[in-house]
Image: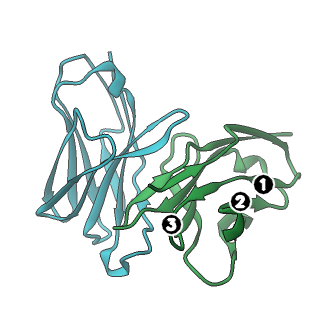
Amino acid sequence: DADVTQTPRNRITKTGKRIMLECSQTKGHDRMYWYRQDPGLGLRLIYYSFDVKDINKGEISDGYSVSRQAQAKFSLSLESAIPNQTALYFCATSDDRTSGNNEQFFGPGTRLTVL
Amino acid sequence: AQSVTQPDIHITVSEGASLELRCNYSYGATPYLFWYVQSPGQGLQLLLKYFSGDTLVQGIKGFEAEFKRSQSSFNLRKPSVHWSDAAEYFCAVGAGGNKLVFGAGTILRVKS
């Protein structure tokens, strides 16, 4: 079984709808991240969390919110989706016991299309 | 602020030919550097990483990368490319606090 899973893998929605993307991990890592990938822009950090009570904005947090329900779960919400949020979204984890090495482990991605 | 530049958006090489993907970074201290690969429809897989020590780093799938502080570079190389290496490759630098800053990616096409 995959260590980092994301659901759904694909989603098509309409402008104005609320969408939640979910991420679960079995790696036992405390640190979790949400990125979006756009062609030609690489991956950009949306939000990150270093433990259950910690939420931090990343580079492009506007229009998004997150919830860290448990160590293993980190959800990304789009309160009112707009077409320029069409992208590939990745969840990632890292182990704070090796603090400083920055290595992250990625889920398979969720392809979101907003019409 | 940290940044990563991958100057080549697309690269096409013949199967069996050598490969070099370029990566330049901007970071004030000794960087943590990574190369990830994304195959079509897949997540990102770590190819290799540099933290300290030997500047030539060996990774999976026959890839290696060389850290050159004087050039702020961390180029990825492979002596003989296979068709299965066709993918998108991302260079990343550790930005402190376990965050990563990614380059825009290089799409590798392999022709037979």
Crowd rating for badge 1 (residues with CA inside 10 Å; few <14, some 14–19, many 20+): some
- Which type of secondary structure does the marked residue at label 2 adopt? strand
Pointer 2 residue: B75
Q: CA distance from mark 3 to mark 1?
A: 25 Å
Mark 3 or mark 1, which has the lower sequence index?
A: 1
Report the chain holding disc 2.
B
Residue B29 x/y as whole percent: 51, 71
Q: Nearer the viewer, mark 2 or mark 3?
A: 3
Q: Which chain is green?
A: B
Residue A43 x/y as whole percent: 45, 45
Q: Which chain is cyan?
A: A
Pointer 3 residue: B28
Residue at the image point whose x is 38% and y is 61% from the top: B99
Report the chain holding disc 1.
B
Residue at the image point whose x is 44% and y is 55% from the top: B1
Residue B85 x/y as whole percent: 71, 50
